[in-house]
Image (cartoon, rainbow, N blue to C red):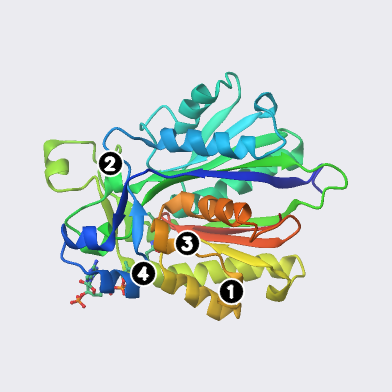
Amino acid sequence: MAAYHAKLSAFGSSVPKKIVNNFDLEKIVDTSDEWIRTRTGMFERHHATADEAASDFAHEAAVRAIESSQVRYKDIDMIIVATVTGDYPFPSTSCVIQRKLGLKGVPAFDVSAGCAGFIYAIHTAKSFVESGAARNVLVLGVEMLTKITNWNDRGTCVLFGDGAGATIVSRANPGDISRIIDSLVEADGSQGDLLYQAAGGSRMPASHESVSKNLHTIYMEGNKIFKNAIKSMQASSEALLKRNKMETEDVDWIVPHQANLRIIEGLASRMKVPMNKVIVNIEKYGNTSSATIPIAMDEAVRSKKIRRGDIVLLTSFGAGLTWGSVLARY
Ligand code: ACO
């Protein structure tokens, strides 16, 4: 039994100003607007410029989430950032954000779980809040995947965008209708080589050769990832509903990772959920990895599509392989 309940307090997001659409991509790689739209559902995405980095957008997203919540800066007692493209290999991007927010002393750490990072970070924050070890955990998903994109690989370079999203996982007060009902995270390291960045770590540190061979960029076997993504998100969503004695009809909104519209539609169809109950914004942002879900939540909450008391199911899948879901009454 948890000592307390945790809830999702508020959301905030931030994306770079620079927008790159499918026609812009036609000029740099052998692709077409038609292929990208029909195979992925994407039309435009935001790209960070050379002098912009993860913490710039994460900081802005954090400020927006805090200002939309009842939580004061001084009441934040932990920062967790989900990212694989932080400002530096070290220190953690959460420490950079802690400095920008002026929250000296507050514990801060990063979580690496690819596109499922935000779900992993919520799962972690929820445990701290439920045990009483923290009261308000600032949770961020931020990714600058265009900084590790291989611009010669048309199978990946059209997919990614940059951005950040934030929420605060807070202790629910008695009488609050909002609460995180349950969360589930899983991984399968045996398939890690389907989606990875070969160079830049201790296995293959940066060298002239690694750079000239483009090994610091994303390698992905898209087709295999595609099938895994649908299966895993469906299994985890259904397991979470089942162990809470809930049906898909009890869910008001599914907020899935935005990697490919066909993945989202495949998931909805297998779960027998109509697409008008699924939040989709992939046409505007592409795949921002760990930031897709908090950006989608922020937009849906601000546009009053998602309202207090709605049951939301967040689900994601990414490098690792990792996947997981969060079931919450917002
Ligand atoms: N423009 C035009 N043609 C292209 C492009 C492009 N941008 N990219 C690939 N093609 C071609 C291929 O060369 C291939 O041509 P061929 O048949 O002549 O060989 C054809 O299109 C089909 O290629 P596939 O790879 O089979 O295309 P698919 O329908 O699988 O779509 C995609 C590719 C979009 C990558 C899809 O597989 C996908 O979305 N995968 C999942 C991505 C994902 O979920 N990633 C997880 C998170 S990412 C993270 O964690 C960082």
Could you say whether the residue bearing mark 2 is in a helix, strand or loop? loop
Q: Position of residue 5 (x, y in %)?
A: 78, 46
* Amino acid at pointer 2: Arg
**Residue furthest out toward the right:** 175
Q: Amino acid at mark 1?
A: Asn
The yes-or-no answer for disc 3 within 8 Å of ligand 1 is no
Q: Nearer the viewer, mark 4 or mark 1?
A: 1
Q: Tell which of 281 and 202 is nearer to you.
A: 281
Callout 1: helix, strand or loop?
helix
Give the labeled residue for mark 3.
281
The answer to whether 212 appears left or right of 62 in the picture is: left
Against 256, is 68 above or below? above
Within-10-Å neighbours for mark 1: few <14, some 14–19, many 20+: few
- State how far apart marks 4 and 1 are (Cα): 18 Å
Give the residue number, with chain letter if any, for mark 4.
Answer: 40
Residue 286 position, x and y percent, is 38, 58
Determine which quarter of the picture holds residue 285. Answer: bottom left
Residue drawn at the location 62% of the way across and 31% of the way down: 78
Q: Give the residue number, with chain letter if any, for mark 1.
A: 276
